[in-house]
Image (tube, rainbow, N blue to C red):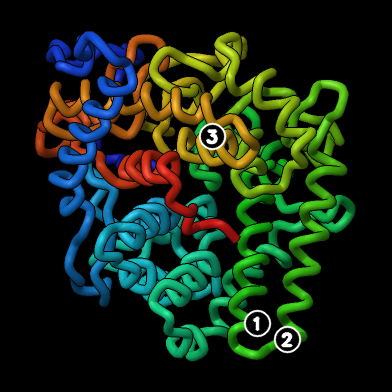
C-alpha cells in the first residue's frame, strides 16, 4: 500500500479495531438458504455489480506535473503510488473492453518522476514527485508495467523510445541494494517494502539495507523476466540472455538462502547476523506468487503456514502476520506506519490467492474468494465503499476511518481491492495476465 507514514497532516489513530460507527448489516451475512453454490454465485454477481460502480473512482485525469491520466487508491490517497498504480492499472487492463493504456500511462508517469540523484519516487502528485526519505522510492515494478502494457497494446514503439531508462531504473538496485555474497537484494527497510511495519524486516537502524527479504527478491525476479521479454521483442538478444540468466540466478539464490527445508518455509535473512527472521509474515509467501517455489515446497508450506488458522488463515481472509507472532495485532494504525502486523490486506490476499491457485490449491483459493466476497459486501453495505485493511478476527473495517480522512468520510479506499474481481475471473478460467 502507499506508505501512510507520510500523511503527517492526518489524525493519529488509537489502537481499537472497532468501527467509528456501528457496522451496518449486509444481506451477505445471511446468504439465501438452499444450494451453497448458487448462493455464492449470487454473492459474486452482487459484488461484481458493486465493484463496477466503484471502479471509475480510481481514475484521475492528468494534472499539472502528472502528464498522463493516472490511477489512485482512493480514501485520502489522491496520488499515483508505485505498486498501487501498477496493480490498479493491471486490473483495468483485464476489463472488457481492455484498458491497458493505464499501464502505459503509469509507466510514463514513473519515468517522469526521476529525482536529481537518479533514484525514482514512489509517490507522484500533481505538485511533483515526493522527495525526502530514502524509503519512499520506487518498488521493482517498472519493467513489469512496461512489458504488460506493450504486450496488451501490441505496441513496443514507445517502449523502445524509453528502453534504456526503463532498464536503468529496473536494474538500479544492483548497485544500491544487492548483497553479492548471497546474490540477493535487500530493502532499505520495512517501509520501503510497502508492508510498512512488517516485523520480518523492521525499521530499526539495524535493518537498513540489511534484510534480504522474500518479497523484494520475488519482485526483482519478475523484473528480470519482464526485461528479458522486452529485450527479445526489441531484438536485443544478448540483453535477453543476460536478464534471463539473472532471473535464474536470483531464483536459485532465493531457494538456496531463504528456504529452510527443516521448517518448510521461506524466511527473510538478516545479512549482517546471517540469521533468518523466523517470522510467519506476508512476505514469506510472495515467492509463490512469483512462481519461484517448487511444487514440493509449495505443498509443504501452504498448508503448514498459510492455510492454517493457527497462523495466517482468519475467518475473513488471510492475515498479514501469524496470530502466533508476539507482535500480532489488528490495531488501526496509519501514522507512523500502516499496519501489516495482522490485518487482512486485499493486496496480500491477491498474492496468496495466485500462489494457492498456481500450486494446485484450487478449493482453498475458491474459499478465500468466498470469504473476501462476503467481507467486501459487508463493507459496501456499511459505508458504500471499501477500506485498505480489515480486522482479521471480526471483519470490521480499519483504515481509513472517518477521523483519518480530511473529508470526514469512512472508507473510500478502492484501488487494488478491485483485484478481487480478477481472482473471481481466474477461478472461472481467465488467464492471469501478469504471468511471466
Q: Which of marks 1 and 2 is nearer the N terminus?
A: 1
Circle 1 crowding by C-alpha within 10 Å: few under 14, some 14–19, many from 20: some
Q: Nearer the viewer, residue 92 or 405?
A: 92
* Residue 94 place in picture, x, y as percent: 35, 58
Quadrant the N terminus occupies: top left
Numbered label attached to residue 237: 2
**What residue do we see at 17% from left, 13% from top?**
23
For marks 3 and 2, give the CA distance.
34 Å
Q: Is residue 173 visible?
A: yes
Circle 3 crowding by C-alpha within 10 Å: few under 14, some 14–19, many from 20: many
Q: Which of marks 3 and 2 is nearer the N terminus?
A: 2
**What residue do we see at 60% from left, 14% from top?**
308
Q: What element carries label 1?
A: helix
Examine the rendered structure and indicate whether residue 335 appears above or below residue 108: above
**What residue do we see at 17% from left, 51% from top?**
57
Q: What element carries label 3?
A: helix
Residue placed under numbered mark 1 in the picture: 232
Q: Is mark 2 on a helix, strand or loop?
A: helix
Amino acid at each position: 500500500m502507499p506508505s501512510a507514514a507520510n500523511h503527517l497532516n492526518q489524525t493519529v489513530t488509537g489502537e481499537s479495531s472497532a468501527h467509528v460507527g456501528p457496522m451496518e448489516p449486509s444481506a451477505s451475512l445471511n446468504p439465501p438458504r438452499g444450494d451453497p453454490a448458487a448462493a455464492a454465485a449470487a454473492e459474486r454477481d452482487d459484488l461484481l455489480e458493486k465493484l463496477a460502480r466503484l471502479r471509475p473512482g480510481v481514475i484521475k485525469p492528468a494534472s499539472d506535473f502528472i502528464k498522463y491520466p493516472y490511477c489512485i487508491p482512493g480514501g485520502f490517497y489522491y496520488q499515483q503510488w508505485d505498486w498501487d498504480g501498477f496493480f490498479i492499472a493491471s486490473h483495468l487492463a483485464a476489463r472488457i473492453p481492455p484498458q491497458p493504456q493505464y499501464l502505459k500511462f503509469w509507466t510514463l508517469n514513473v519515468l517522469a518522476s526521476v529525482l536529481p540523484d537518479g533514484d525514482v519516487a514512489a509517490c507522484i502528485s500533481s505538485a511533483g514527485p515526493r522527495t525526502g526519505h530514502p524509503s519512499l522510492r520506487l518498488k521493482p515494478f517498472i519493467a513489469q508495467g512496461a512489458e504488460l502494457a506493450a504486450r496488451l497494446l501490441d505496441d513496443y514503439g514507445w517502449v523502445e523510445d524509453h528502453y534504456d531508462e526503463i532498464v536503468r531504473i529496473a536494474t538500479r538496485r544492483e548497485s544500491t541494494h544487492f548483497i553479492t555474497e548471497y546474490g540477493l537484494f535487500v530493502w532499505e527497510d520495512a517501509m520501503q517494502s510497502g508492508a510498512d511495519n512488517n516485523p520480518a524486516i523492521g525499521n530499526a537502524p539495524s535493518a537498513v539495507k540489511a534484510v534480504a527479504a522474500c518479497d523484494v527478491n520475488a519482485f526483482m525476479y519478475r523484473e528480470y523476466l519482464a526485461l528479458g521479454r522486452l529485450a527479445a521483442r526489441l531484438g536485443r538478444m544478448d540483453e535477453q540472455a543476460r536478464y534471463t540468466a539473472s532471473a535464474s540466478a536470483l531464483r536459485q539464490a532465493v531457494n538456496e538462502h531463504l528456504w529452510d527445508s527443516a521448517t518448510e518455509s521461506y524466511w527473510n535473512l538478516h545479512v549482517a547476523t546471517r540469521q533468518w527472521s523466523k517470522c510467519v509474515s506476508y512476505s514469506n509467501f510472495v515467492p509463490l506468487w512469483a512462481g519461484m517455489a517448487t511444487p514440493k515446497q509449495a505443498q509443504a508450506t501452504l498448508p503448514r503456514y498459510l492455510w492454517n488458522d493457527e497462523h495466517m488463515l482468519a475467518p475473513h481472509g488471510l492475515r498479514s502476520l501469524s496470530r502466533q507472532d508476539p507482535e500480532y495485532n489488528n490495531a488501526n494504525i496509519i501514522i507512523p506506519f500502516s499496519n501489516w502486523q495482522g490485518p487482512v490486506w486485499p493486496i496480500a490476499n491477491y498474492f496468496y490467492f495466485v500462489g494457492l491457485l498456481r500450486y494446485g490449491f484450487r478449493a482453498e483459493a475458491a474459499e478465500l474468494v468466498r470469504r473476501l466476497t462476503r467481507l467486501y459486501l459487508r463493507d459496501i453495505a456499511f459505508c458504500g465503499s471499501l477500506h485498505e485493511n480489515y480486522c482479521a478476527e471480526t471483519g470490521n473495517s480499519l483504515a481509513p476511518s472517518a477521523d483519518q480522512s480530511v473529508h470526514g468520510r469512512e472508507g473510500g479506499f478502492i484501488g487494488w481491492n478491485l483485484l478481487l474481481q480478477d481472482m473471481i475471473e481466474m477461478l472461472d478460467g481467465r488467464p492471469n495476465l501478469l504471468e511471466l
